[in-house]
Amino acid sequence: MSLRRPFAAAAILACAFLVFGAAPAAARPTGYPSTIDSAHFEIHYTGDINATDRVTDQTASDVATMAERAYTAITQTYGYPAPMDDGDGRIDIWIATTGGGDVLGVAFPDTLASQTSGYFQVDPAIGLNDHTIAHEVFHLVQFGLWLPTDGWLLESTAEWTGFRFEGFPDTILGSLGAPDMSLDCIGDKCGNDDYERGGYSRWSFFEYLNEHFGSTIVKDVLDRGAALGDPTIPAITLLSDVLAAKGTTLTDVFNDWTVANLNGNYTAPGLMNFLPPAYSQLATGDKTATLPTQQVGVNHLAARYLAFQRGDGSDGACYAASLTIDVTIPAGIAAKPYFYWPAVGATPQPLTISGSNASITVPWDTCAWQYGGYLLLQNPSTTADAQIFTVSSSITVDKNTPASATAPPPPVSVWGPVVPAPSTDPAPTLTIHAPEILRVSSKTRLLRFVVYSNGQGKLQATLGSASLGARTLRTGNNDVRFVLPQSVFASLRRTPASANTLSLTSLSTQGTVGRTFTRHVVVQKPAPKKKAKKH
């Protein structure tokens, strides 16, 4: 299992990626002769001045201290059992290079049994922090409870433990997965980066469960797996069984979680009072009208949020109005659509459901506001994908009643930028997560970085005078890659970084040009070859 750091809007965060079938204890790292023992851990490291992953005794002691603090929190405060003993009474941690530029730590089971002890290593350059170590210690707890379950459950719950141990800092919103990604999705098809593909980004679901069903909810799920003893039973089934024993259903809990995500209704500080990213934006205009019908597909255990923007974007006279929304729910889907306007004291309002139809009429106006209203469409089914919701809406304007826009205060945090929707085809607003100087390997000639986009569009890239083409952007984080042509790469070698300007331009789906960002590109120097040691 490898521990990776995802690109985030405000910070780079730590996580871990579990690989089943990891090597048993015989494959533990070698060449780390020094050890420091604490009450529950043995830290293995090297102080060799020539080693690339050398650390001092003080650093090794700090790792032991962090591990002990995480152990105490997990076993005493959170109520989980200690990791299984491997026979010597201490958990082994190696401070060792993990072998990847973004891999913070790696955890392995000692055996391939369903319940086993384990060990982990943390990268000395990037993995020595509270989040990483708490995440990995919790993996070892999981190994002792029930190892052969779905990776998304193991990774999201270990990530939840890491954030919980940190106290849910206000930088964590960048770690949340796209709401329209299925809760139990894992693998290449599930996202644009390793953090989403590995299942980590669904960790907030388990914080929601913690706040409503108690801290040991994950233990209950793993205990259920161990009781059944069948590794083929999906984790989502184990979770459904546990919730049923608590007098509720996965359908109801999932629906309630998507409502909590509508307005950040959590007690965890870093998750409170945020707005979700909007799947679509619709300006309601300044005249009585029937608005365009929207057909929205939602996959299983996923949700989409549709934004309705008051007015037409102008600052002219505005009037009172009412907005009516009607939703046709797909047959057999127990969805509960909600509408939310982020004003002071406002809460999400359920639509009135009659059969397969849901509807609501809310006070509205034609003024220009900073935020829109949000319609939540969720699909709590565990199997049915591409369920199409039909959304019809209309506005009725009262020209006899003037109104004014007294903007509600912005939320403490925004889970993806929320902006007024103009009537034109705007280029998306982008955030480029990349250093000022990008380094390109001569082996791959690959430029790679992450772009956060507030809507669908394209990213046009030009290096100097050479066009690298365009990449399609979706709402949320996008893992963007360009392979430099050989001729462009050859030119790159001959010129300094200051002359190799990479221009990244935001384009709408129809080609409207937005903001251009710049970075500089250089060829990465190969690592020097190590001289053979004389004996």
Image (tube, rainbow, N blue to C red):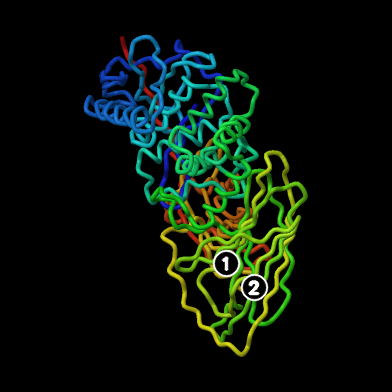
Q: Indicate which label's residue lies in the foreground, 1 or 2.
A: 2
Is disc 2 placed on a helix, strand or loop?
strand
x and y, in percent, of residue 233 in the image: 64, 25
Residue 373 tag number = 1
Q: In which quadrant of the rendered view does residue 84 lie? A: top left
Which residue does the image show at 61% across and 90% down from the upper left?
400
- Residue that protrudes farthest toward the bottom in the picture: 400
Q: Quadrant of the C terminus?
A: top left
**Amino acid type assigned to the residue bearing label 1 in the image:** Gly
| Residues packed near mark 1 inside 10 Å, few (<14), some (14 to 19) or many (20 plus) | some
Report the Cα–Cα distance between label 1 and label 2: 10 Å
Is disc 1 placed on a helix, strand or loop?
strand
- Answer whether residue 54 is visible to the viewer in this image: yes
Q: Earlier in the sequence, mark 1 or mark 2?
A: 2
In the figure, is residue 415 to the left or right of 400?
A: left
- Answer whether residue 434 is visible to the viewer in this image: no
The reply to whether discs 1 and 2 touch (Cβ–Cβ < 8 Å) is yes
| Residues packed near mark 2 inside 10 Å, few (<14), some (14 to 19) or many (20 plus) | some
Q: In this figure, which residue is indicated by the disc labeled 2?
A: 323
x and y, in percent, of residue 16 in the image: 47, 33
Q: Looking at the picture, does residue 229 appear above or below residue 285?
A: above
**Amino acid type assigned to the residue bearing label 2 in the image:** Leu
